[in-house]
Image: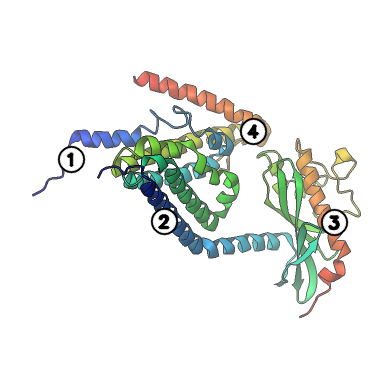
Amino acid sequence: MPVIPVNKTDIMDHWKNFSKGIIKENPVFVLLLGMCPTLGVTSSAINGLGMGLATTFVLLMSNIVVSLIKNLIPDKVRIPSFIVIIATFVTVVQLIMEAYVPALHKSLGLFIPLIVVNCIVLGRAEAFASKNNILSSALDGLGIGLGFSFALVLLGGIRELLGSGRIFDITVYPENYVTLLFVLAPGAFIVLGYLIAVINMINKEKE
Amino acid sequence: MAKRESTFLNMFLALFGVTFIAAFTLGFVYEMTRDAIDISKVKAQNDAISRILPEFDRLDDPLKVPDESGIDTLEFFPAYKNDKFVGVAVKTFSKSGFSGFISIMAGIDNEGNFSGYQVLEHAETPGLGSKMDNWFSNAEKPGQCVIGKNPESYQFRVTKDGGDIDAITASTVTSRAFLSALVKAYNLYKEKENEIAGNPGE
């Protein structure tokens, strides 16, 4: 009877592929990739969540497909091939969002097509999926995507709370006491800076 | 399986294959979602119209009227109740918002006063310009409310420019754009009033 070799190190490896994206190699806080959507859409927690999940879907699917066809694609044309694959999934996400969640589509607007040029997605395709098997690539895409979502929700939540007194559109304290700066562009930089410092501290302590 | 060599034929086949499958997938998803997208657009528009006009039971197809530039058009949706004209919803716009284009559905009742509005599309700053969603319809603050007013008896400009409407705090540019869109809708409506409102029965 053929035994599928599943041993402890395999599972540990899979878990590592998945979990590294969330804190240890968080694309926003540690790798500092994808800054444009990060700063642009995080004026509220719900926008951050929508953008994060859309990107997660694209990452997961493009990592799977890239890993699946990595041997069919000659090296010299790999980047254009990856970009076409990514752009296809982004357009699929955009059409589906426009059809079924028009409100979210409206508020994310321009940033959805820009997932195509989000360097996290191409970065994972090139650095990970084109060198690893499908399962590892899928786990990597999912982990990095969730790490990205986590970062955007955290950033969006803090900015929304400080800047408009609400979180996920639920009023926490009256609007008279808010610091408007935080929903504007400078607030994004300030909050991001502090969050990077905190994540660095956590990662240092772990070592 | 070994990696393919970068020969001309292999590169050609790989790119052709990838783009072909991508095009096929996109065509398929587009076909699948097209109806749903149309429905959700029409629904958003109808929801907006029914919120800003007095009660009506019939809404006519939009009448397209070119504005003064001659390039852009405003859409007028005349509404009737028991074949009596009750008001018109105007899809109007301004290009001079703080972040460019603003699209507004404005309701004008049969007495020529604004009966409501709904911002359809904008990219104004959250927490500042985006307050126009309900700033100008706040009945508790008559200085900033446009409901029940018309540009003939009130100056539809912000107080800073000598008008009668209080601008959104710290968003004068957005407020100016908003008011200019309403005035544009009103003026065109007055100009074409007979054409728009003069179709009671069918």
Mark 2 packing: few (<14 Cα in 10 Å), some, or many (20+)? some
Q: Residue furthest front?
A: B8
Q: Residue furthest left?
A: A1
Mark 3 packing: few (<14 Cα in 10 Å), some, or many (20+)? few
Give the quadrant of residue B99: top right
Disc on res. A6? 1
Marks 1/4 same chain: yes
Q: Nearer the viewer, mark 2 or mark 1?
A: 2
Mark 4 packing: few (<14 Cα in 10 Å), some, or many (20+)? many
Classify A161 as above or below B156: above
Marks 1/3 same chain: no
Give the quadrant of residue A126: top left
Check disc 3 and give the amino acid type.
Answer: Glu
Local secondary structure at mark 4: loop
Q: Which residue is mark 2?
A: B21
Marks 2/1 same chain: no
Sequence-earlier tag: 1 or 4: 1
Query: Residue visible at 56% across and 60% down?
Result: B37
Query: Residue visible at 58% across and 61% down?
Result: B40
Q: What chain does badge 4 belong to?
A: A
CB atoms of marks 2 and 4 within 8 Å: no
Q: What chain does badge 2 belong to?
A: B
Q: Which residue is mark 3?
A: B68
**In this rendering, would B18 be left or right of A169?**
left
